[in-house]
Image (tube, helix red, strand yellow):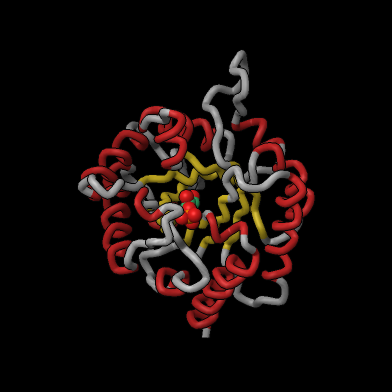
Amino acid sequence: MKTIIANWKMNVGSRESVALARGVLLALKGKKQLPDVVVCPPHVALGEVRKIVARSHAALGAQNVFWEETGAFTGETSTRMLAELGVSHVILGHSERRRLFGETDEAVGKKIVAALSAGLVPIVCVGESSTDNAREFVATQLRGALKGLHLRHKERILVAYEPVWAIGTGVAAQPADAVSMHAFIRSLVADLLPGVKASQVSILYGGSVDGANAYAFLREDEVDGLLVGGASVKLSEFGKILEAAVSVLEARAA
Ligand code: 13P
């Protein structure tokens, strides 16, 4: 299976989110082989977007969450609140949150535990900047975030490999480099989560994905899907990414 996730970041309000969600559903219409699709609007638009995607093929994701269930945490949102809004996925540890809001691996770890216990699927973002040793850096992030975690039978986790230097720059990773990093992440996650089944872990690529390069990533078995930023708020571009996923899936089904 392939999973395509749209991270709309803080780029659209409720009205535009609703229009985008409608466009995504339209783009999926009539296709026989569909990727899993998750749209992640800003928190304020979740309620409206839910009405559009309810009973559709697309799932609803949030861009962040806090780990406490309730209490005096002004401005924060809990996993239960998201679940109540029909949210099924949540992006955690995005590099923008790490860089701008001081999110640490430990904080990401607490959010993963909270998300799983509320029945949400965590989308854990990792990725190095241009000055880091990529494998070492990503390994440290994963060790920190997954420490002590035990995935139960039906729980799933998505890891999004998003090299910081590729985010919003127009310079995507080479698919071959992403493949090698994904293989590394997959074996590290298997080591960190003993007993975890392959079907419980998906590894997505993110960073300057667009309609022109999506297919080159998606045709790789190591790439379980894509986490898309800028191109996800342009319907024509996102439509091409969905098309790329559909053609990979159709070719496999043939
Ligand atoms: P871009 O697709 O704009 O590079 O952003 C990637 C990203 O940060 C998705 O979470």
In the image, residue 71 above or below residue 143: above
Q: Residue at x 71, y 76 (%)?
A: 30
Q: Residue at x 62, y 53 (%)?
A: 39
Residue sitting at the far front? 169
Q: Quadrant of residue 241?
A: bottom right
Q: Position of residue 21 (x, y in %)?
A: 71, 57
Total tally of numbered discs in the picture: 0
In the image, residue 43 above or below residue 227: above
Q: Quadrant of residue 124?
A: top left
* Residue 98 visible somewhere in the drawing: yes
Q: Position of residue 36 (x, y in %)?
A: 58, 61
Q: Residue at x 50, y 83 (%)?
A: 251
Residue 167 relative to residue 133: left or right: right
In the image, residue 151 above or below residue 77: below
Is 15 in front, or is 219? 15
Residue sitting at the far bottom? 254
Q: Residue at x 31, y 34 (%)?
A: 144
Residue 224 relative to residue 241: left or right: left
Is 102 in front, or is 182? 102
Residue 71 relative to residue 148: left or right: right
* Residue 204 visible somewhere in the drawing: no
Q: Position of residue 117 (x, y in %)?
A: 54, 33
